[in-house]
Image: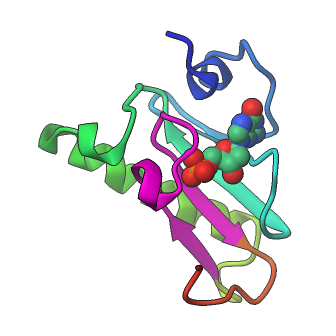
Amino acid sequence: MDCIFCKIASQQIPARVAFENDRIIAFHDLFPQAPTHILVIPKTHYSTLNDVPASESALLGEMVRTAILIARELDFADNGYRVVMNCNQDGGQSVDHIHLHLLAGRQLTWPPG
Ligand code: DGP
C-alpha cells in the first residue's frame, strides 16, 4: 500500500513521534498550522472516516484519548487546544489515511474557514 502515513507508522519514513502504542502513533505535522501541531493516526489503514466500521468505534475514542494525553503531557491542556478530523475533498482531507489534528499554542480562530 502506497500510503505515506502507513510508512510513518512502520518507520519506513521518519517522523518526530510524540506517542506510540500497538494501535496508535502520533507525530508532529510537517507543515504546522500552530506552534504545536500533532497528527494522531491509527496504525491500521482506513482511508477516510467513512471507511471506519462501527466495530472500530473504540479506536476513534482512543485517538481522542491520545490527544488528551498528549495535551496533558505537553502542558497545554489547561490553556486549550483543538482536535479536527478532515474527511474527503470538501473537508480538506489531503492524506488518505485517517488522522486527528491536535493544534495548540496560539489563539485558534473559529470558524476555521
Ligand atoms: P489533511 O489535510 O487533513 O489530510 O492533513 C494532512 C496533514 O499531513 C497536513 O497537515 C500535512 C501533513 N503531512 C503530509 N505529509 C506529511 C509527512 O510526510 N510527514 C508529516 N509529519 N506530516 C505530513
For the rendered model, the colour scheme is rainbow
Which residue is farthest left?
54
Relative vertical location of residue 71 with respect to residue 25 in this rendering, above or below:
below
**Magenta segment boundaries in residue numbering:** 81-103
Q: Is residue 59 left or right of residue 56?
A: right
On whether residue 91 falls in the magenta region, the answer is yes
Give how far across and how far down residue 28 sits, in percent. 76, 48
For ligand 1, give the image quadrant: top right
Which residue is located at x 81 percent, y 58 percent? Answer: 32
Residue located at (59% from left, 75% from top): 82
> Looking at the image, which is closer to me, 82 or 4?
4
The reply to whether residue 18 is visible in this rendering is no
Q: Which residue shows up at 43% across the image and 59% down it?
A: 90
Q: Position of residue 19 (x, y in %)?
A: 66, 43
- Does 97 appear above or below 19? above
Q: Is residue 5 above or below residue 77?
A: above
Q: Residue at x 49, y 34 (%)?
A: 96
Q: Quadrant of residue 55?
A: top left
Which residue is outermost to the front?
90
Does the magenta portion include 87? Answer: yes
Instruction: Please identify the residue farthest to the right as the structure is shown.
Output: 35
Task: Decide if residue 29 is in sight here.
Answer: yes
In the rendered structure, the answer to whether residue 100 lies left or right of residue 17 reads: left
* Depth order, front residue of 6/47: 47
Query: In the rendering, at what x and y percent does residue 25 appear?
Result: 59, 37
